[in-house]
Image (cartoon, rainbow, N blue to C red):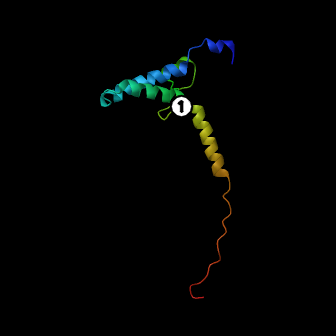
Amino acid sequence: MSAIDDYRYDLRARRAAALTAAIMQEIGPYLGDNKRDAAKAIDNLLWRLGIDPLSDAERARIGLRPRDNKGWTDEEIALYEIKIKQAMLVPPAPMIWPPLTSPLE
């Protein structure tokens, strides 16, 4: 950890808070009086799990490739397709069948 790490703001915490706010706007009306406790629990959970969403605008701003509607970049799709093709080229394990017996024997 370098000295500059101590001066940077916690981007993950900011994004977790933004996502918590969006979730709370949606589910807030169903919670009743426990909104503050629920928001705190969601925020802590997102931060602990390391959930760090990047919007399409943020990705473009920092020079990352855009994601498709399923969340994949072009490079990730290409790598995935290579892995699938390699798996398809592996010969299957030999199958040893038991000897056939006649029901009349």
Q: Residues within 10 Å of mark 1 (few under 14, many from 20)?
A: few
* Residue 77 placement (x, y as % from top left): 57, 36
Identified at 62% across, 78% down, the residue is: 100
Which residue is nearer to you in this view: 85 or 22?
22
The residue at 60%/40% (across/down) is 80
Image spot of residue 82 (x, y percent): 63, 42
User: Would you identify the image quadrant in which residue 29 lies?
Assistant: top left
Q: Residue at x 59, y 34 (%)?
A: 76
Question: Judging from the image, what secondary structure is the residue with disc 1 in?
Answer: helix
Nearest the eye: 55 or 11: 11
The count of marks equals 1
Query: Is residue 55 something that shows in the picture?
Result: no
Front position in the image: 31 or 61: 31
Amino acid tagged 1: Leu
- The residue drawn where x is 62% and y is 37% is 79
Residue 1 position in % (x across, y down): 69, 19
Q: Which residue is mark 1?
A: 49
Quadrant of residue 72 in the image? Answer: top right
Across and down, in percent, residue 105 comes to 60, 88
The picture quadrant where one finds residue 78 is: top right
User: Looking at the image, can residue 94 be seen?
Assistant: yes
Residue that sits furthest to the bottom in the current view: 104
Relative to 80, is 15 above or below?
above
Q: Is residue 74 above or below residue 14?
A: below
